[in-house]
Structure formats: structure tokens, C-alpha cells
Image: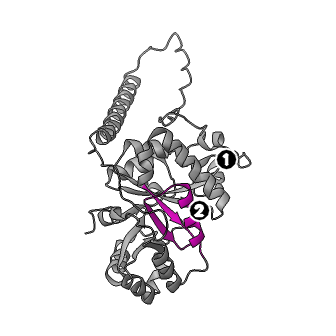
Amino acid sequence: MNQTNSTSHSNTKIPRSTGAPSRAQAPDHPSNTPPHKPKSCLTALLAICCCALLTIGSYFFIHNLNQTAQNLPEITQNTHNIGNQPPYNFNYSWANEHPYIAHALGGIMGETYTNSYEAFLLNYQLGQRVFEIDFMMTDDGETVAMHGEEQWRDNLQDRPDEAFTTNNFLSKLFNDQYHTITYRTIIDIMSKYPDIYLVTDSKYTDEAHVSAEFNQIISYAKEHDPAVLDRFIIQIYHPEMLDWVMELYPWKSVIYTLYQDPNWTPENVVEFAQASGVKIITINGNELNQQPATAELWNDHGLTIAAFTLNDLNFVQKLRRDFGVKLIYTDFLLPGREV
């Protein structure tokens, strides 16, 4: 979603960076040079202390994340019956509990659109529970978390002509810092963290690609933890897409996102919502700000308005107050910090 203002792994482990390169072996001291200088000893001691502090800090950070996941309350299985034909009775209870959706798994260290493992971990620690993620397919047919192939190529720098394969995608850290992930890792994360929801942002609007992506997700989830599928929130980009995704799986929650549909009008959005049961509408926040009548119409018909992608708290509060916006896609705003 545009911003407004593996080698496939069968297990759940995230590949670790190889770390800093090993130091070249120091040359031998000349025989007439004392083997130990006070200054060298002090430097070595400081280096050892720094390494120890970094190691201990990393240990406690990762340990805390693992303990958080282990201590999560057990989530009751979603038995909400949506029906087998439109208008569906979708379950939007998650929207009543969580005002923010972490865009592209959330921002990290000023970076956006990373869709990375580290971004998820950080934003989960900061209180986010609903995460949006970008999906697209590699040239060899694997669904991966990436906003676009151009973004991936920009990240390659020294090898811009490399083939966009799963192996190559996973072999390079995003901005040399963050681990790229596939749909398998997403399923594994959702299994480990049973209190999160995932909003899908496919980069395709055609049935063939959409079906291929979701079939991979469904197949892997059914093999490993079928319950996670009920915490997927599917974004559709035009009315026909609803039929495509519902034929694949009876998703519990669906959002109609307008940024890829050039044919929407305020009125036909209401008509589609009434006929389909899709009651959350996502729109560009700046665009909505110019259309108060649209917000009024949708609110009058009981629709929930979501706005993307916003990081200005004052603007968010204006949209909530004056336009009835309930959900915000954001990189950096956090729940419980609106002061």
C-alpha cells in the first residue's frame, strides 16, 4: 500500500546474519617489541567489555520476546459463522479492539516498507496486534513479503540484474539489516503469536496471481496450524475479487480497499457493502480529507472507515473527530500513546 504523508524454509527459524567478518590475523610482533603494551591491553579490555554488553543485551531482548510469546493467553478458536454466500456475516470484532494497523509490519528505526521479521518483533513489543503485509510472487512462483520487485532490486546495489528468485530474495538482508520472509514464516509467526491478525496486501488484481498466492498460504497453514487462517483479514481491491478469495477459503474478515479500483464511487461502495457484507472500507487519508460528504454517507450506512498510511497524530485525530475514521494504517503511531 502506498504511503500518504526463501530458499524456502520448511522450519520456523529465521536465517541469522553471518555477523561481522572475522578479523585478519595480526602480524607477529618483532622480537625486539614488548609483547604486551598497556595501551593495547586497555583497548582489548574495552573491546571485550563492549562485546559482552552487546551479547548480554541481545540475549535479554530475544529472551524477553520469546517469553512474551510463551506467556500469551490461549485464544479461543473462532467459531463465527459467516455464511456460505453474500451478504456474508464477517467478523470485525478485531476492529473494535485495535485502532491501528501496522503498515508493512510496521516501521523500524525510521525505515518503512521493510516487511521484515525484525519489524514485526519490534512493533509487537510496542503493542501492535494487527499487521498489514505486502505479498508478491518471485519468478519461481513463491509468495514473499515485499512491496515490489523494484524495491528489491534497489536493495541489491551491486547486483541489479540478479534473477528475482526465492533463493536470491532470501539471501540478501533488506538494507543490509533486516531479514526478508516468505509466506511460510508469516504462518509460523501467526502460530507462535496467537493474538495477532494479518491484513493481506497482495500486489495483484488478477485472479490467477491472487489464487496462486492464497492457495500457497492456505495449503501451508492447513499442514501446520489451520486456525491461523481465521486471523487473516483479506483486502480486496475490486468487487469481483471477493468471489475469487471466498471460493478458496471461508475467510472470517474482508476489507474493501479502494486504491487499486479506479471505478469506485461513494454510492457504489455502499451498494457493494450492502450486497456483500464487507463493512470496512479503506481509503487514502488525504483523499478522504477532501470528501466530507463521502465519510458522512459511509458512516450513515454503518460502514467502518479505515485510512492509510498516516503518521501524523494531529491529522489522525482530525480524521477521527471530523470524519468518523476508526482504523488507521500507520508506520510509527502506537496504541495507547495518543497524548
Where is residue 301, by image quadrant?
bottom left
Q: Residue 27: percent from the left, percent from the top?
A: 56, 18
* Amino acid identity at mark 2: Trp
Residue with the mark numbered 2:
244
Disc 1 packing (10 Å; few <14; some 14–19; many ≥20) = some
Q: Residue 98: percent from the left, percent from the top?
A: 32, 62
Here the colouring is one colour
Q: Residue 20: percent from the left, percent from the top?
A: 51, 33
Comparing 222 with 106, the one in front is 222
Q: Tell me: residue 27, above or below residue 192.
A: above
Q: Which residue sits furthest bottom?
A: 293
Residue with the mark numbered 1:
141
Between circles 2 and 1, the one closer to the viewer is 2
Disc 2 to disc 1, C-alpha distance: 19 Å
Going from N to C along the chain, the mark reached first, 2 or 1, is 1
Q: Is 64 covered by the magenta stretch?
A: no
Q: Tell me: residue 207, above or below residue 325.
A: above
Question: Which span is picked out in magenta?
Answer: 232-261
Where is residue 71, by image quadrant?
top left
Comparing 84 with 334, the one in front is 84
State the residue at coordinates (52%, 15%): 29
Q: Tell me: residue 2, above or below residue 200.
A: below
The kind of secondary structure element at disc 1 is: loop
* Amino acid identity at mark 1: Gly
Q: Is 234 covered by the magenta stretch?
A: yes
Task: For the residues labelled 2 and 1, say whether their Cβ atoms are less than 8 Å apart.
Answer: no
The kind of secondary structure element at disc 2 is: helix
State the residue at coordinates (59%, 62%): 244
Q: Residue 339: percent from the left, percent from the top?
A: 25, 69
Q: Tell me: residue 104, above or below residue 314.
A: above
* Residue 77 visible: yes
